[in-house]
Image (cartoon, rainbow, N blue to C red):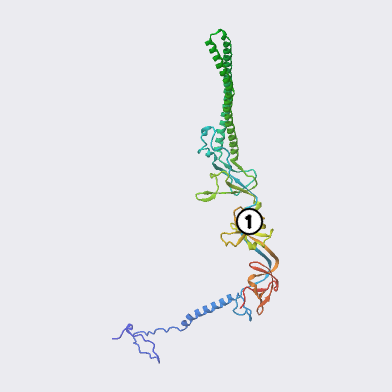
Amino acid sequence: MASSPSSAPAPGPVRGPQVTLPQPVTGPKMVPPKPPEKRRIALWGIPLAVVLLGGGLALYLNSGGKAPAKGGPGGPGSSVPMIAVGLGDVHRTVRVNGTVAARNFAALLAPRIQGSRSGMNRGGDSNFGGGPGGGGGGDFVLVLLHLAKPGIHVKAGDVVAEFDPTNQLLRLDDFKDTVVQLENTIKKMMANLAATKEAHDQTVRTAKADWDKAVLDLKTAPIRSQIDQEKFKLAVEEAQAKYKQLVAETALVDESQRAQIRSSELNRDQSRIEMQRAEVNVQRMTIKSPMDGIVVMGTIPRNGEFGQIREGDQIGAGQPFMSIVDPSSMVLNAAVNQVDAERLRLGMKGSIRLDAYPEVELPGSLLGIGAMSKTSTFRASYVGEIPVRIKIEKSDPRLIPDLTGSAEIVLGSEMNALVAPRAAVFEEDGGSFVFVQGPQGFIRKPVELGLASFTAVAIHSGLQKGDVVALQRPM
């Protein structure tokens, strides 16, 4: 029985001469394809090409896109950073930090309320009992009713704050009533004094008449009995004593009445003084600006932390709550190390920057230097600081007191000089030199230095404009 094509064994590769086996006529001949050798070469060639390309690119980037100078230190494989020197300005400065303040300013204080706290001789519900809150203390509570917005410009005489005048108006009305009442009382007492004096005088006249009658009766003694004579004598003595007593009491009665009137007059005068004080207190409830300037609000403790004063806050008498500052008199109060302070001179120029507005740069000049140094809690005791004051010579609407900032005080300048970075200048054996790029590599050249800042230095001789120098020592 002939075998099917699926049951025929598949021929495999053999070494040596290939022998073709006879196949059945009934089935097709099946030979497995031979794997191509060229594909294997492509697979490992691709990674090799990528490595070579990456190495060439890295070498190009390290050389700065330029072919390094052949021979010398700047030869093949060199990657020294370089820069061309040019003309510019060099400034030696001292940096200080401080706080913005105003030289010309006016501190506004809460009004000091005048008057007695006892409430004596005060009319109304508080008469002899003190004012609201006990003892008149409620009259001395100051509550801000209206307040100018911080940062606005005001003119001299503008109203910038108003305190609640209700308590002072009530106090004024009470003392006005007291003054009127005491004046009427004094008038009544004067009328009573006149009536009392007239009544006493009438009593004195009556006693004098009784004494005169007793004297006349005594003249009839010779025709009277001895007992009547003694009675007439006693009547005369009694009438005389009574008359003399009443005459002596006349001055005392008058003095007593006048003392009571004087007491009422003193109470009236005291009430009148309190009324005048209350009138002044009412006027003091309105605060006006004493000068042209910007409104700067104060702070007050609120809920355990300090916050800006606002309407409705209760302010203590005499407490500062607002300042009016002149924006043209702004200064920067700072401190400088005592070593750097020896190089400072009045009038030195500088530039001022604000921490809150980094884009703002304002010109300034050194206005004052402290005479005594002070120590800082953050430094050793032997390191002292000298307070300095720098005048801000240009105004800015964003410039307000209490802003922190810094100033660069210029100690010296060289204008339009040949400038090189300090990193390009090297020192050795007391001399300075640079490495200048040449056709065959870097050449060492001595230079004469001028004024130096923290980042640049002026070159007086040894270089020319456009020379390319190394920023680090070449190998």
Residue 428 position by quadrant: bottom right
User: Is 172 rendered above or below residue 246?
Assistant: below
Which residue occupies the extreme bottom position in the image?
17
Residue 49: x and y in percent read 52, 79
Judge by depth and name the residue closer to the eye, 248 or 23.
248
Residue 14: x and y in percent read 39, 89
User: Is 407 rendered above or below residue 228?
Assistant: below
Which residue occupies the extreme top position in the image?
223
Number of marks present in the image shown: 1
User: Is 65 rendered above or below residue 205?
Assistant: below
User: Is 197 rendered above or below residue 465?
Assistant: above
Which residue occupies the extreme left position in the image?
1
Inspect the image, locate mark 1, and give the three-letter code of the amino acid beneath it.
Leu
Residue 139 position by quadrant: top right
Residue 242: x and y in percent read 56, 18
Label 1: which residue?
332
Label 1's element?
Answer: strand
Judge by depth and name the residue closer to the eye, 129 or 320.
129
**Quadrant occupied by the C terminus:** bottom right
Residue at the image position 57 percent from the left and 8 percent from the top = 222
Packing grade of label 1 (10 A; few <14, some 14-19, many >=20) is many
**Quadrant occupied by the N terminus:** bottom left
Q: Is residue 15 left or right of residue 110?
A: left
Residue at the image position 58 percent from the left and 47 percent from the top = 320
Residue at the image position 60 percent from the left and 41 percent from the top = 286
Judge by depth and name the residue closer to the eye, 407 or 396.
407
Residue 219: x and y in percent read 58, 10
